Amino acid sequence: MTKTVTGMAVGAVLALTWISVGFWAFVLVALAIAVGGGVGMIMEGKLDVHVLADAFRGKRSSS
């Protein structure tokens, strides 16, 4: 599946959630999608948890 198709599917899910059950369910689904995407990136090795933690702590990277 291409990134465009994936983005369209995510957008459709969010739009249908907002239409059918309201704004706060939309926010919850969007948050769940973001967390799931982050976990997937960590598992694939595309996101380094240590760099992310340092960024939240305010430490700057050397690169």
Image: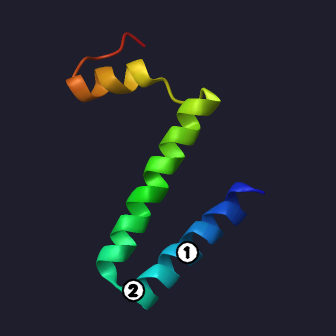
Q: Is residue 56 left or right of residue 43?
A: left
Which residue is identified by label 2?
A: 21
Q: Quadrant of the N terminus?
A: bottom right
Where's residue 19, x and y in %?
A: 44, 89
Q: Is residue 16 left or right of residue 8?
A: left
Q: Are marks 1 and 2 in contact (CB under 8 Å)?
A: no
Where's residue 62, x and y in %?
A: 37, 10
- Amino acid found under the numbered disc labelled 1: Val
Residue 24 occupies quadrant: bottom left
How crowded pointer 2 is (Cα within 10 Å; few <14, some 14-19, many 20+) is rated as few
Residue 42 occupies quadrant: top right
Where is 8 relative to 32, above or below? below
Q: Is residue 44 left or right of residue 38?
A: right
Element class at badge 2: helix
How crowded pointer 1 is (Cα within 10 Å; few <14, some 14-19, many 20+) is rated as some
The residue at 55%/75% (across/down) is: 13
- In front: 3, or 31? 31
Residue at the farthest left position: 58
The Cα atoms of the two marked residues, 1 and 2, are separated by 12 Å
Where's residue 29, x and y in %?
A: 43, 66
Mark found first going from the N terminus, 1 or 2 = 1
Where's residue 50, x and y in %?
A: 40, 18
Element class at badge 1: helix
For residue 13, the mark is 1
The residue at 44%/48% (across/down) is: 35
Residue at the farthest top position: 62
The total number of labels drawn is: 2
- Amino acid found under the numbered disc labelled 2: Val
The residue at 34%/69% (across/down) is: 27
